Image: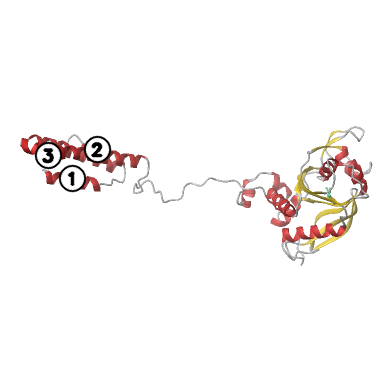
Amino acid sequence: MQDIINQYTAEINAANPANADELEVFRIKYLGTKGILKDLFEQFKSVGSEEKRVLGKVLNEFKQNAEAKFNHLKETLDSGLNTQDSDTDLTLPGDGFALGSRHPLSLTRIEIVDIFKRLGFVVAEGPEIEDDWHNFSALNFPEEHPARDMQDTFFIKKNSGQDDIALRTHTSSVQVRMMENGQPPFRAIMPGRVYRNEAISARAHCFFHQVEGLYVDENVSFADLKQTLYHFVQELYGEGTKVRFRPSYFPFTEPSAEMDVSCTICGGSGCNMCKYSGWVEILGCGMVDPNVLENCGIDSKKYTGFAFGMGIERITNLKYVIRDLRLFSENDVRFLKQFKTEII
Ligand code: DAH
């Protein structure tokens, strides 16, 4: 009997059922009502009393071992840890989460802001609902300027001019808030959403996004403006991208300019993105008008500064060759998921 017990013990120790069905076969075979254990206890009854003393101990140990083995196997299978279970392959990769992606306009904004942060600019924000002073008057807009017109501006409250409330038409209003609340040096980048009363089409929208920049200190010159923006373009579009400044007009800068970059699509040889000119305009800029500095309580004899403003949509369109502005606000997942990036 001892021999047969040894043999069964070896069998039990080696048992490795792969699933619940095989474990049940194991249980029935060793622990079942007509199983081996039962049978051994039956045989035990008929051994001599001398032998019983030794064999009783052996048999009890065998029983404990068989039960412990069964419990252990069951636990392993229940917890799914058994890699041999044909239904569970733990070496397979898990089900991934469907992570979202950043909006292309956010990607561009982050990139622009990062470049200026590396130059020591801080990020500032202001309200989207603005008063006449911050959006127009402090920025030197003449009373009769067309931008103040209902056709361009969404007014929330329209009275005499001074106490008008509107959705801001540009992020230049944030410059005013910043300068009113401190003294130079100012070195800030101001991203945000702006609103204009435009019919929605592929080329125009009633809301879009801008990034405003402001640098005010002693002895800031147009050369500083050019060098800063030149560096920005090299970072954004790569070394060797050309820039050119064309004279322009904005009420809040004097002199004013618009900056073009060599077309990022065709490299300057001409394509329909740059209307075969080889150049695309990306921003407006200039030296902060002394009137604006004075309006904000800054001594224009002591300080000078430059400012610039760019449209995030425009830069994104150029980067990804997107030709319809409406795509940015339609929330069509088929469009958005093309911009999969590492979410940081
Ligand atoms: N605010 C202007 C716009 O919305 C953009 C702009 C131009 C901002 C020149 C500036 C600037 O700061 O200097 O079109």
Give the residue displayed 78% in from the left and 40% down from the top.
Answer: 126
Q: Residues within 10 Å of mark 2 (few under 14, many from 20)?
A: some
Alpha carbon of mark 2 to alpha carbon of mark 1: how far? 13 Å
User: Which of these two is toward me, 187 or 109?
Assistant: 187
- Please state which amino acid type lies under the numbered disc 3: Leu
Image quadrant containing the N terminus: top left
Residue 67 is tagged as 2
x and y, in percent, of residue 87 in the image: 37, 46
Disc 3: which residue: 55
Foreground mark, 3 or 2? 3
Disc on the earlier residue, 3 or 2: 3
Give the residue displayed 12% in from the left and 39% down from the top.
Answer: 55
Disc 1: which residue: 8
Disc on the earlier residue, 1 or 3: 1
- Looking at the rendered structure, the secondary structure element under dot 2 is helix
Foreground mark, 1 or 3? 3
Alpha carbon of mark 3 to alpha carbon of mark 2: how far? 18 Å
- Please state which amino acid type lies under the numbered disc 1: Tyr
Residue 197 visible at all: no
State the image quarter where residue 322 is shown: bottom right
Q: Residues within 10 Å of mark 3 (few under 14, many from 20)?
A: some
Does label 3 point to a residue whose CB lies under 8 Å from ligand 1?
no
